[in-house]
Amino acid sequence: MSDQQQATPASLRDVMSRFATGVMLLTVGGEHIHGMTANAFSSVSLEPSLVLCCVAHSAVMHRSISAERRFAMSIMAADQEALARYFADKSRPLGPSQFAAVDWYPGPLSGAPLLAGALAWLECEIIEAHDSGDHSIFIGSVLSSLTGPAGEGLIFYGGKFRPGAAKPAAPGVRITR
């Protein structure tokens, strides 16, 4: 094991890059329509159905999601890396024009854009928001959930987007349950 060091933003970013996460498109509809590539997302509870997403206070999404109070998540497929990069690019157009060249449809309960070709979708309503450091943790009650065709997911690992194909264990490695 290497020497321990004082935690800094750079060292935390390095450590967290070694944790593979799914990639999703977080969207808000209505007057504050906006999309953002995200990986700070998790299921919280099945009963009741709750999820959370974390958004930086400085992000355009923070203002949008706080104002609209409803959001959607599109879980991105492995072949949607270009869209993940597009919605992570801070120089893209804002407002409705950021969706002009994107295949999407409005969520029936949230009005938030749902990305065509995604693996699954959630529509949520914020029931709690907690400030923590430079982010807010938004807890959403799941209003609807839908799965699309099975396929590989897009993951983020080591600072790069990668297809999320499951790989068999290496020879000689035994996995027990």
Image (cartoon, helix red, strand yellow):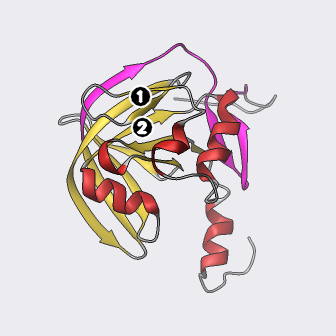
In this rendering, position of residue 147 left or right of residue 174:
left
Task: Rate crowding at label 2 as few (under 14), some (14 to 19) or many (20 or more) other CA atoms within 10 Å.
Answer: many
Outermost residue to the top: 149
Residue at 66% x, 58% y is 17
Residue at 61% x, 18% y is 151
- Residue 91 % position (x, y): 64, 59
Q: Which residue is mark 2?
A: 73
The kind of secondary structure element at disc 1 is: strand
Q: Is residue 162 magenta?
A: yes
Name the amino acid type tagged 1: Trp
Outermost residue to the right: 171
- Residue 62 % position (x, y): 38, 61
Which range is magenta?
141-168
Residue at 61% x, 86% y is 6
In which quarter of the view is residue 167 placed? top right
Q: Which mark is residue 132?
A: none
Q: Which residue is mark 1?
A: 121
Question: Of callouts 2 and 1, which one flags the residue occurring earlier in the amino acid sequence?
Answer: 2
Name the amino acid type tagged 2: Met
Q: Is residue 144 above or below residue 55?
A: above
